[in-house]
Amino acid sequence: MSAIAQRRRSAIALATTHALGQALVGLPTPRFTGDLNMADIRMRSLGHPWERTTVAADDAGGHEDLFIALFLRAMETVPELRSLPGDLEAYTVRWDGEALSIFHPDVEQAVFRVQPDPERSAQGGAPVRTRPPELWREERGHSFYPAPEELAEIPGLWATVLEPHEHRVVGLRYFSAGGEWYVVEVDDATGQAYGWSCLGVDLSQGQWGLIDLPALESCRPDGDLSRLVVRDLAFTPDAAANVLPEGRPHDSCGDGDCPVCPSDFMTTYVARLRAVIAEHGFAVQAVLSDEGSAAYCYTVGLHESLGHEFVMAGLDVRVMQGVLHSVVERFAGSSGPVAGEVLDGLLANGFQLLMRPVESLEPFAMLRAVYGREIAVPYWQAVWPDRDGIFPTDASCSLSPGTQPLL
């Protein structure tokens, strides 16, 4: 998970030092039910000049929550802020009733300042630049930018800062062989945009942030047309929750009854496991292999009827799932396995299984998730041998270290 995602998913409590000494609580994405109006503000991030903009604001009065939301957006888009530690509880907020300043103990000066700017003076603001002309219009066969009237329907930069990520309407989609980009805000004059993007195919690395549309338009690495970024002409604007690709991390607004935000994956998955256990007596949870560990499968819920659970490691997941079901059948109605017990007839080619007690419950995260607490459940590992029938509990076993970890 990215540092920004961790920041937004953590419980955020920013301590204030204003006269009343009250805590100013900033939610991951502030939500408002009142009417919104437009507020002229000026803000400054660490290492950057003052920037002036107009954003939608709560019509209820003070701008504290708006300013916190602007800070959280800056943490997504300003490199100097992205490089700071991700623990939001380390930040201090000073609010004087009009201006807000945010400090971090590792930085001597304020990392972010924001205040109303009713005069909207252009002096001292960020430099203004214009959007350059398209370079690869002919190669694409269509314009990179939509028609002016369509572009005008997309909110300007900072305009959706008060909306939860999943609620924001995606107005444009771009894609290439190197990634995809979803735009929710855009500055028509410069082409600078804000939205969700992912480079490559690993959607877990996708994130919300700035999107430089002119840079995307001009990019054509090594003349490879498949790397040319093109606009999705068939794309229909919709809420981010409905159009961003599945498999990405998402930032729910936190409302369990929200009709827009996707449900929390873990909550849904645990509910599904509990339903399987209720119907079949147990479930088999698979943990896929990665660069540092072998795959393994383990039962969850079996201890309620048999008093123990089973686990296997190091084989193909589908093979282990089938073997574990056979192990469960073998011990059904018995008092359970004993250390060193050998089972015949459950593996192909006449190989045996060795039963050994598991030393730690740490690998069984879904056991804790399903039952909501740490519980002392005995797990037995069904261990398979090498080609000579020797188990890894024997020093002469030819299996390489890590092939079948003894849990």
Image: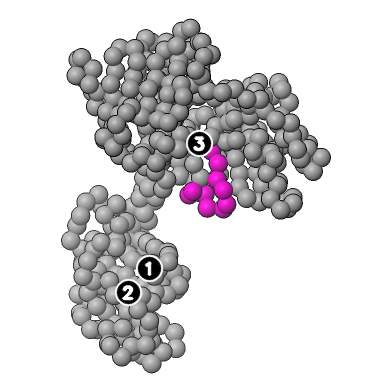
Q: Position of residue 74 (x, y in %)?
A: 44, 30
Q: Which residues are magenta?
A: 196-205
**Three-letter code for the amino acid on which mark 3 is drawn:** Gly
Label 2 to label 1: alpha-carbon separation: 8 Å
**Three-letter code for the amino acid on which mark 1 is drawn:** Ser
Label 1 element class: loop
Left or right: where does residue 186 sit relative to residue 148? left
Front one among 103 and 40: 103
Residue drawn where x is 43% and y is 21% of the image = 43
Q: Are marks 3 and 2 in contact (CB under 8 Å)?
A: no
Residue drawn where x is 52% and y is 29% of the image = 168
Which corner quadrant of the image does residue 342 belong to? Answer: bottom left
Q: Which residue is mark 2?
A: 405
- Which of the marked residues, 3 or 2, is nearer the chain's N terminus? 3
Residue 141 to residue 345: above or below: above
Q: Which residue is mark 3?
A: 209
**Three-letter code for the amino acid on which mark 2 is drawn:** Pro
Was residue 199 drawn as part of the magenta stretch in this picture?
yes
Q: Are marks 2 and 1 in contact (CB under 8 Å)?
A: yes
Label 3 element class: strand
Label 2 element class: loop
